[in-house]
Image: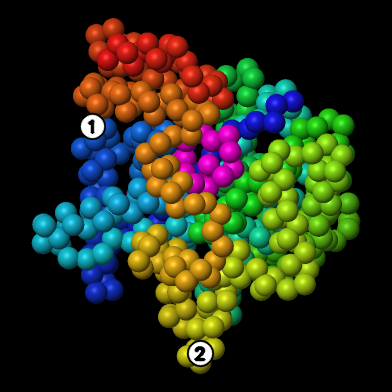
Amino acid sequence: MTKRRIFGLETEYGITFTHRGQRRLTPDEVSRYLFRNVVTWGRSSNVFLENGARLYLDVGSHPEYATPECDSIYDVVAHDRAGEAILDRLAFAAEERLQQEGVKGTVYLLKNNTDSAGNSYGCHENYLTRRSDDGSRHASVLIPFLVTRQIFTGAGRLVPSARGTQFTISQRAEHIWESISSATTRSRPIINTRDEPHADAELYRRLHVIVGDSNMSEYSTFLKIGSTACMLRMLEDPKWDLRDLTLENPIRAIREISHDTTCRRRVSLQSGREMSALDIQREYLSSALRYAEERGFPEEEQRALLMWEHCVSTIENDPMKLERLVDWVTKLSLIDAYKTKNALSMNDAKLQLIDLQYHDIRRDRGLFYRLARHEQVESVVAETDILNAMSVPPQTTRARLRGAFISAAKAKKRDYTVDWVHLKLNDQAQRTVLCKDPFKSRDERVERLIESL
């Protein structure tokens, strides 16, 4: 069994444009300004970039950035961060263009998952799996893991209600309605089963997880991808047994867990037992630690395993001690400190503003980045690697071929079309190269296509 795996993140952003606190343009209008530079690159508002990533405008006028194919968890985090930087540059350019047209105001891009109207937009994870693997254990093993991992991957949210405002661990938990389904919007599932591997369909599947929150914390992003990779490693090993912790009602459980910042509320299993999110995570972690001893994980997954162990053991003691690492804890600490200092009630609008400003990706404005500047949150990725990822694709996956083709075609001012598997020159010959292997970073056919430009 190969130790390599392809990973990817797709992040949708909230967008708004305000002047002196009042909304001036609709999300659709400001998105058009945001993507005007993209269109001038010679494409529509659905474009693949020279770093191999995809940038497009999703349903509901949400800018979405999909990282290129990465075979390194570190690279996923770097390219996720690069997506923020690319979108922030577009937002800054849109502001300047609007001002030139006499429209004063500020473009806000928020890396969160809900808006004030109650709409939700996602952060989707992709893991390449083999079609020969047994997917039947996803419901009994992966679903309980994904439902409970929010205790260290949740982004946190203030939720107003008739009984007052409550802080919840996860932003997506209230918007998930099924365990496994092919839908993505009307009845959002934890795992999406639409069979689009973007690879050789006879060999591969793409596990598409849509339950996760968008993370500002690099630590949480690395741990979210890495701990799930560890789970998949164990699931794919036919000689490794994992306990059946099938939840009686995963949708009820994900909400109950999200509403409990102690991480100790018990939920019902199909077996009749009751376990907390912490109990379930401890169970899976124990199995992963044994696996590491007996079989071994690749280096990055081993790193994620140690982070996973640190989070679980810290939550057992006091979840708030994860303040520098886990988004929901960092945000709750900010809210509690401001609330106490100013003698506010939990319903105060100023706290809702903190909730939103935490996710502002503008580095000189967002609350998360203010903490980062004062070294109050842990970083995982070097700034130089983020800057590099803005223009350079991963060099060990198919993204390298796509990035090289796009760069060469743009340099020669040639018309082209690309998607995840096709590279096409829009000339009289309509030459197309099909790249079905996401692990393949070098291909003589692509090199010949580039040489022919």
Q: Assess disc 1: are there few (<14), some (14-19) or many (≥20) residues with their C-alpha within 10 Å of its C-alpha.
A: some
Q: Is residue 78 found inside the magenta-colored segment of the image?
A: yes
Q: Identify the residue shown where x is 40% and y is 67%.
A: 366
User: Which image quadrant is residue 169 in?
Assistant: bottom right
State the quadrant of the N terminus. Answer: top right
Question: Residue at (52%, 19%) from the top-left corner?
Answer: 436
Foreground residue among 425 and 205: 425
Residue 296 in the image: above or below residue 116: above
Residue reaching furthest top? 429
Residue 60 in the image, given as x and y percentages of width and height: 38, 49
Q: Nearer the viewer, residue 398 or 112?
A: 398
Q: Which residue is mark 1?
A: 42
Q: Amino acid at mark 1?
A: Gly
The mark found on residue 326 in the picture is none
Decide: marks 2, 1 in contact (CB < 8 A)? Answer: no
Where 51 falls versus 189 (above or below)? Answer: above
Q: Quadrant of the C terminus?
A: top left
Residue 33 spot, x, y in % from top left: 23, 50
Q: Is residue 24 left or right of residue 5?
A: left
**If you read the primary sequence from the N terminus, does the residue marked by circle 2 or circle 1 appear first?**
1
Residue sitting at x 32%, y 28%: 407
Name the kind of residue labelled 2 in the image: Lys
Which x, y percent locates residue 188? 57, 47
Q: Which residues are magenta?
A: 61-80
Query: SS for tag 2?
Result: helix
Q: Residue at x 72, y 45 (%)?
A: 302
Helix or strand or loop: what does disc 1 sit on? loop
Label of residue 341 in the image:
2
Q: Is 335 part of what is drawn in magenta?
A: no
The furthest residue to the bottom: 343
